[in-house]
Amino acid sequence: MAMLEIIEKRRAYRALDTKPISDDILVRLAEAAHTAPSSMNNQPWRLVTVSDETVLEKLKEALAPGNYWAKKAPALVAVVTNNAWGMTLGERHYAPFELGMAAMAYQLQAVQEGLYVHPIAGFNADLAKEVLGIADEDSIMVLMVVGYPGDSSHLSEKHLESENGKRDRLPLENVHAFNHFDKQLKPKGK
């Protein structure tokens, strides 16, 4: 599969199967994230893959009500960082940026493996950190919901529409310009 095709195929789907994902595949996903670039090779991200049913059920209690669909997932991955783990230049903390590159590498490998992966921010971070034994000073930037494609009949009408709808992106000229920051790049109302 061509890289752009894999990138375009990656989408935050919600219709998941409960079928377990093998540890071999879960390790390959982590290996993909592990290859992401980082300044001074700090690798300021950590992944905690949760597939054990007991721990998974406890972690799912931290999900926001709008993420009801994620309760079918056979795996959740906490993507953890701390600004102190990465390079800082003035006000620029690179840890979140580098974590984002690792998370994208993870997602692209998931597509290659025939999986859906959906990063979410809708969870109780304090409860999730308690379940996973993550220190207060560290941040779970995102939980990634991972599973095989499944039946969408349990999804809300809004989520069904999103699941089956056209991919909605801003026009390229609103997010890209050559040679200078053009006024159309500024988000509307900002």
Image: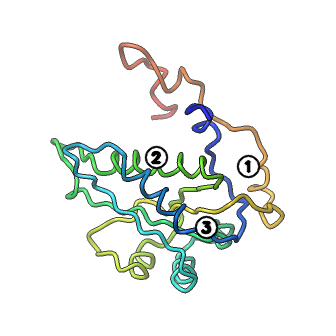
Disc 3 from disc 1: Cα separation: 25 Å
> With respect to residue 34, does 188 lie above or below?
above
Determine whether 5 is above or below 179 in the image: below
Name the kind of residue labelled 3 in the image: Ile
Classify mark 2: helix, strand or loop.
helix
Which residue lies under the disc numbered 3? 21
Say which residue label 2 marks.
105
User: Which of pointers 3 and 2 indicates the residue nearer the eye?
Assistant: 3
Please tell me in which quadrant of the rendered image residue 83 appears.
bottom left
Q: Which residue is mark 1?
A: 162
Looking at the image, which residue is at 56% across and 23% down?
A: 172
Q: Is residue 5 left or right of residue 186?
A: right
Q: Nearer the viewer, mark 2 or mark 1?
A: 2
Mark 3 or 2, nearer chain start: 3
Q: Using the image, determine if residue 107 lies above or below residue 80.
A: above
Secondary structure under badge 1?
helix
Residue at 37% x, 53% y: name it.
34
- Of the residues tagged 3 and 1, which is closer to the observer? 3
Tell me what residue is drawn at x 32 percent, y 60 percent.
81
Disc with the residue nearer the chain's start (2 vs 1): 2
On screen, 179 above or below 133? above
Residue 43, how many percent across, how many down? Answer: 28, 53
Question: Callout 2, which amino acid?
Answer: Ala
Q: Residue furthest right?
A: 153
Colouring chosen for the image of the structure: rainbow
Q: Identify the secondary structure beneath mark 3.
A: loop
Q: Nearer the viewer, residue 96 or 3?
A: 3
Q: Which quadrant is home to the N terminus?
A: top right
Residue 151: give x, y in percent of width and height: 80, 62
Q: Quadrant of residue 47?
A: bottom left
Q: Residue at x 48, y 73 (%)?
A: 124
Q: CA distance from mark 2 to mark 1?
A: 24 Å
